[in-house]
Amino acid sequence: MEALDPDRILSFVDTFPPPPGEVRDFLAGGDVQPSQLIRALRSAFSPDGPTIGDTPWWDHAIAVAEGAAMVAESTESADPRMAYVAGFLHDVGHLVMVRLDPQAFHQVLARQGDGTPFMAIERELCGLDHVRIGEHFARRWGLPDEICAVVRGHHELEGEITPLFASVVLADVWAQVLGYGYDFPAGGISFRVDEAALAADLIWSEQIDLLAQADYRVVARRRELGATPRPFASKDGGAERALWVSVHGGEPTPLGRMLLQHRGYEVVHVAATERLEAQGASLILIDSPWAEPDEVGDLVTALVPDGHAHVALLAEVGPEQTSRRRDPLSGICGIPRMFTAFDLRWLQSRPAVVG
Ligand SMILES: [Fe+2]
Ligand SMILES: [Fe+2]
């Protein structure tokens, strides 16, 4: 790989043409629709590049734009159009990296999850992280200071957390949870949700509601733009069943329930104190955070007597860990208790446990 250095990156940014007129018109409240804005940005960024939906960058940008605008609308605290543009462009630094050297960006992605914060990996490989590159880009495009501040500060929460800033930070994290993006480790970003939710004055249940709505909006927007449907976005009516087994009592987490329902599952909850029997579930989640796969073998034998199902133990994981593992003997997997759409996708791509 040809070395990327800060001078080369910043001068590359300086060669980008000015923003398409749609950006200014959209921000000014003109009748430019979000899909027109997105199409204009796509032609500006990558006239010959992959189509929308073919790369995680675009899906992430759309999801964060929709989510941020939704937070701004529902809290009536920030201009939804500013939130849309800020959300769409918050990671523009990554796009610059991809345009300049796709290899470098793929190296960053390949090393995610090894415990190193990914911005440190970016600085190591490129001499600059995507928030610095993005800020340079946003300034070159003459975007409002508030948007530049979001681009610059969205990871380390630098500067004042304005409602606009908070809307993008929340939408950024939630987009990853919903499976739109690159799957940077989820645990380490939770403090950002807490800080931003406080600034946006949103309690947990309100966030779950917004998240569910945002998921529908993203699906609709992608469809409008002609993107290929995501592999597990819908199961077209034939609901599969997910069985949530609480070994120590308690309820399914609201986030987990929402994600499963949005992935087309009918969620059935049982307590391990009940008489357990197979319920025809294709997905079984065992909520027993400190158990090991071999300790729940009997439970699984009762639940999958003559079928097959993907079985996961929900584990408590620390802030910097992504815990996905599969026990080769039993086929039982481990995923975080606060799992994301990426964890579900991973689980579904492993071989099922056969009863
Ligand atoms: Fe970012
Ligand atoms: Fe992001």
Image (spheres, rainbow, N blue to C red):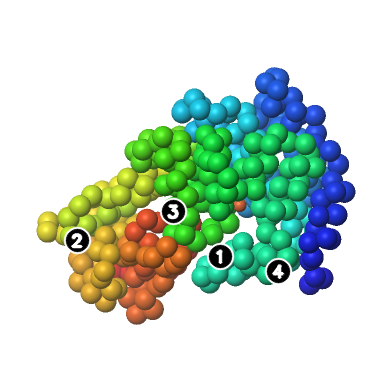
Q: Residue at x 25, y 64 (%)?
A: 288
* Residue 283 visible in the shown view: yes
**First along the sequence among labels 4 and 2:** 4
Element at label 4: helix
Amino acid tagged 3: Ser
Residue 319, above or below 54: below
Label 3 vs label 2, nearer the camera = 3
Q: Are marks 3 and 1 in contact (CB under 8 Å)?
A: no
Identity of the residue furthest to the bottom in this view: 329
Apparent side of residue 350 relative to residue 280 in the rendered image (left or right):
right
Q: CA distance from mark 4 to mark 2?
A: 45 Å
Q: CA distance from mark 3 to mark 2?
A: 25 Å
Mark 1 Cβ inside 8 Å of ligand 1: no
**First along the sequence among labels 1 and 4:** 1
Residue 294 % position (x, y): 26, 76
Q: Which residue is mark 3?
A: 190
Residue 306 % position (x, y): 26, 65
Q: Which residue is mark 2?
A: 247
